[in-house]
Image: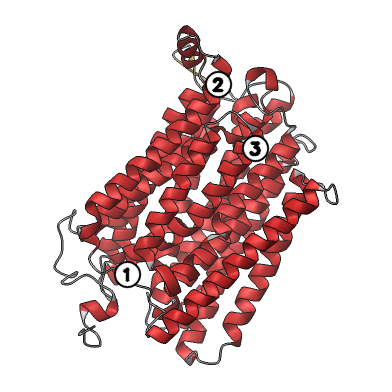
Amino acid sequence: MNTAQPGSAAATGFPVAASEDRAFFGHPRGLSTLFFTEMWERFSYYGMRAFLIFYMTAAATSGGMGLDTATAAAIYGTYTAMVYLLSVPGGWLADRVLGQQKSVLYGGIGIALGHFALAVPSPGFFYLGLTLIVLGTGLLKPNISVIVGQLYGAKDPRRDAGFSIFYMGINLGAFLGPLIAGFLAQDERFRAIIAGWGLNPNDAWHFGFGAAGIGMTLGLVQYLAAGRHLGTAGLRPGGASTPELAARFKRQAITWVGVGLGLLVVVGLLAATGTIAISPTFVRDIAGYSLTIITVLFFANLFRDRSWTPDERSRLWVIFVFFACAAVFWAVFEQAGSTLSLFADRSTERQIGGSPFPASWFQSLNAVFIVTFAPVFAWLWMTLGDRQPSAPTKFAIGLIGVGISFIILVPPARAALGGTLASPLWLVLVYLVQTYSELCLSPVGLSSMTKLAPARIQGSMMGVWFLGASVGNFLAGQTATFYESMPLATLFGAVSVMPIVAGIVMLLMRRRFTAMMGSVR
């Protein structure tokens, strides 16, 4: 029997005495468990993502898939969009059926299996692996962030700083992943090593995929070993407050899973009989329509609910605004794995001390800068306290900054038209500016979602944050399809316009949005 009193630690989902727990750099000990779990998950995700578009565009004689750039970009954008889109049902399942802790565990298992499937040199296993990673990340990604928020009391001033530390874990993994997995997949020195073992050097790509799977496995081992430090945070579904509701939500989950599997079977049969052709373009179009429909239906259903108090409804409007800003931001920022990667590979000098290095290594720059400057930003917000900029102001700075980062690339892109390779310092500067922008928007957005969302739908609202990332990733992939059909300077200049305009609007409206947030800061 639950003997917790309303407002007690157990009733609110926070670990007992969370406000006194300062075992991990002044933060709850459970933060370290989540820090390292997310670090290894991001190691696997960014490690594989760093060379994914190179693997798809590499010639079959080099062990790649031999796809053209536009097709590879469409697959890449659809995959990264679906990774975040599945966060919406992942948050729903955690809220109503599984709880966040189990969702993180099951999601991690799916991710590890997906990467190991990619390690098998077969087109069928390639698409199976991407599908498993999409499903697993949809369960893990939104819910691990919710657990971080539940480690702190509702008014604990350490919350934003805690998310900044958590963000360091994300980016430590994002730093190591491209270096290790990218080296195994692309570096000629490793290919020579495996050739010396009597293996086909073209299989190096699959060593990179396998390294990503090992990373996620290490994260799972750590999560299970240190899970006790999470206490009751995310242990039980927050929305299933009675046995009757729990049973109802389980029936709904079974129904929707059945519908999803049924649709997959129908599509598979239609493809097998030749009724429809499953192509990257077909999948991209389906993903685009799905994103549009899901976004409209989700917010329409959310605002139709008459149970919200006026304060909650006002905060839900702010969540919608933050969602739109996040979509614009990630549409620009997430071109790191597509347009920026292609620019690094084809138009940038890649040597250190005369020794060449893989283009995928550039994707570690953002992570290096995050790990370096996240503590500075965390210290800054803690020091400023109530005097720090509001969340809408931070969003505005982040949007304008990420837009400026692409303006920086216009001069070297023009030079590249004449065959001049750009200095790697251009990309270093771009990633530095994007890092500052990201630190103003992403950890603040994660923290704001956990504070703005009504308690009974926290997982679902975190799914909204990742829905914004899904829309942004999809748009980023579509932008990359123009890489070979549009002058680079024109493409980079066009990319910069939308975030700068959105940032200016956000800056002008910051006081209004701050007032709509009520007591949340």
Secondary structure beneath label 3: helix
In the picture shown, does residue 470 fall above or below 42? below
**Residue denoted by label 3:** 124
Tell me the mark number nearer the camera, choosing from 2 and 1: 2
Position of the N terminus, as image quadrant, is bottom left
| Residue that label 2 marks | 203
Of the two numbered discs 2 and 1 on the same chain, state the one appearing first in sequence. 2
Q: In terms of secondary structure, where does tag 1 sit?
A: helix
Number of numbered discs visible in the structure rendering? 3
Q: Quadrant of residue 200?
A: top right
Residue 180 in the figure: left or right of residue 275? left
Point 54% across, 15% down: residue: 201
What residue is disc 1 on?
Answer: 387
Q: Nearer the viewer, residue 426 or 127?
A: 127
**Disc 1 to disc 3, C-alpha distance:** 55 Å
Amino acid type indicated by mark 2: Asp
Q: In this image, 11 relative to 300: left or right?
A: left
**Figure check: 325 above or below 129:** below
As displayed, is residue 61 above or below residue 98?
A: above
